[in-house]
Amino acid sequence: MVAFFSAVLAIAMSFAAGLSRLSKLWIVRTVTAVYVEIFRGTSLLVQLFWLYFALPFIGIELPKMLAAILAIGFNFGAYGSEIVRSAVLAVPKGQWEASVALNMKPWQRMWNVILPQASLRMLPPFGNQLVELIKSTSLVYFITMADLTYQAMVLRNNYISWTTEILVLLLLMYFVIATLVSMAVRLLERKWTAGRL
Amino acid sequence: MWDWNYVFDILPELLSALKMTVWVTLCAFVVALIIGLLLAFAARSQWKPVSLMTKGIIEFIRNTPLLVQVFFLYYSLPLLTGISIPAFYAGVIGLGLHYSTYLSEVYRSGIEGVPKGQWEAATALNYTKAQTWRSIILPQAVPPIIPVLGNYLIVMFKETPILCAITLVEMMLTAKNIVSQSFRAFEPYTLVGILFLIISYIASLLVQRLEKRMNLQRGK
Amino acid sequence: MNAVVIDAFAGAEVPQPDPNPAAEVKPMVRYKGVTKSFGDLQVLKGIDLEMQPGEKVAVIGPSGSGKTTMGRMLMTLEEPTEGTIEVDGELLWHMQEKGRLVRANEKHLHRMRCSVGMVFQHFNLFPHMSVLRNVTEAPRKVLGLSKEEAEERAVSMLGKVGLDDKLKMYPANLSGGQKQRVAIARALVMRPKVMVFDEVTSALDPELVGEVLEVIREIAEEGDMAMMLITHEMDFAKEIADRVIFGADGLIVEQGTPEEIFDNPRSERLQNFLQRFRSN
């Protein structure tokens, strides 16, 4: 749940921020740069704590779920924006020039010519980020949200002598999920790139 | 709402915890550098079982959360082996081991960046395997990856708050303790965030400068 | 693939290094029925070749004829699929173990490599070392010379190739011709008995070829080291080789003195090959 919604938010933020950093307006560029630097420069856990524990003091109280989704989503969105930015920049200049020559409008150029090519390049790094994101959902344990890790630790409290079994099982569960996700991304990648590269 | 007196009250405590945080990061980085190199060697081994097993271990560690791994080291190992590890060492080993798998990939890319001709020249001059690694391959494989290693140092620094889960007294746990005494959460957590931001921003500027300087050197 | 090689020799009689008692000197290098396959592609289809001590043998032929593979096998960079190679009367890629012939281990190869040296098409200098260290490193590490001995040897060898004024420079700051001369000094300083020159001028700009050939000519005139010159420089081969070998399609098609090969080619393939070269 957390993983899914925060992944959606992260991808949305990646594209929004990644493209804004290439904007012609300096104000847009600066604001996004500050966003990216702040979220990349501090820890996810610090951000999570801040959203959940610190914000109530200035009158904003977030439910656990929302705090978790926002923290993870914004954090990975900041990293993802760099992926989007570099993938767009990696599209050869001739492609821009060709689309200008065909008299396309700016958003048409971006949507029809540049992004389809850039997204092929983005897929592998996004896949890696998705695995990292799934791993990071374990951190919501700290705000006592009932995720996999939290449940396991509650279980451990009840059956201390089973600690090892519980933790090994927990590791295996994360491993299986992450491996399945990265396999799915690789499959998607192969399907997309077939006959194109 | 933002109480400066309170900020100056708690700042010394947070700064001394920052020292601890940096110390854990550096120790874990050294662990990651060494184990990462060993993993990179083992993954290249010509002996199939060794290389396959190493790759499996790398995948497993990479695909599971650091938090759970640290729990395992801290809570499970004492039950299994009877030796209890202090939080500091569990943190250093956990963080170091986790990132050693990332660094082994970095080493791999550095090693593969050395042209095949260098191996052949070393053979033609009758170097042994160990001599080839020491004086030909590693001196060429490592410099290009130093900026990447630097970036991982920053990443590891930002992962240290996780270690507060095993009662390692770094910045996050210190902030938590302050909060539980004073019931004011806004300043401590914001300060922790700012401290992280300052240090990792300065560090990333340093890495960028290093990268530029090395690119210049290589361009000669 | 390696298992096949060992099986092929299992229980076989150990070949005598010198079956011809009449020969006054034993050959420096001997290829016997050597083949090499990369996957399905057979690049060498059975090479028999002898080189006498101090003999200069030029190997010519169209690209893809397996010339380079031949040289690389002598330098132990490529393992023969079948057949044996002897260097100085000893098998290179095989050794005896309990009366059987088995694939050589690293220790055996290490010992055998003392006799062989090689200069590469793409120089393969160590970019992280100065010119002097490129030439002193191996004598110190491999031969165990002291720093002073190694440097003395290196400086005199670099003097021979005309680069003793560039000791402190790094390979990146040298021209292609200078790089190749350093590479030659680096190989010579190990004092091999036989040296492979693998298309050493092919990667050079035309105006730099001369200086490298000049150095090789001087080395050849000193005489005591056997040389295998894999080359496209026909005039050069004609001038310094004692014997020329023409290879095509993985076989030695023709061999003889430079006069026989260049002035009196017998096979049609060689005639065509030389003609194409002259018209270029």
Image: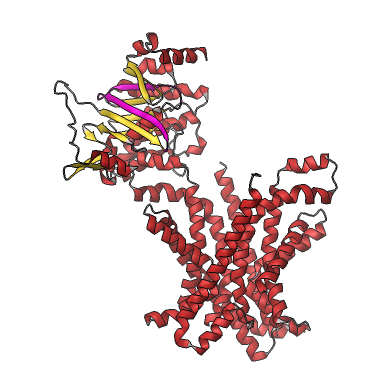
The answer to whether residue C206 is magenta is: no
The image quadrant that residue C154 belongs to is top left
- Looking at the rendering, in which quadrant would you find the N terminus of chain B? bottom right
Query: Residue B88's spot in the image, x, y percent?
Result: 48, 78
Is any part of residue B168 visible from this angle? no
Query: In this figure, what is the number of numbered marks?
Result: 0
The image quadrant that residue C35 belongs to is top left
Query: Residue B44's spot in the image, x, y percent?
Result: 42, 53
- Looking at the rendering, in which quadrant would you find the C terminus of chain B? top right
Against A65, is C163 above or below? above
At 37% from the left and 35% from the top, the residue drawn is C186
Query: Residue A73's spot in the image, x, y percent?
Result: 70, 69
Is any part of residue B192 visible from this angle? yes
Q: Nearer the viewer, residue C135 or A49?
A: A49
Against C88, is B220 above or below? below
The answer to whether residue C60 is magenta is: yes
At 78% from the left and 41% from the top, the residue drawn is A97
Q: Give the extent of the magenta segment.
A: C39-63
At 64% from the left and 49% from the top, the residue drawn is A193
Query: Residue C156's spot in the image, x, y percent?
Result: 34, 32
Q: What secondary structure is the stretch in magenta mostly built from? A: strand
Q: Residue furthest top?
A: C264
Apparent side of residue C127 relative to residue A57 in the rendered image (left or right): left
Please, which colouring scheme is shown? secondary structure
Q: Nearer the viewer, residue B70 or C121?
A: B70
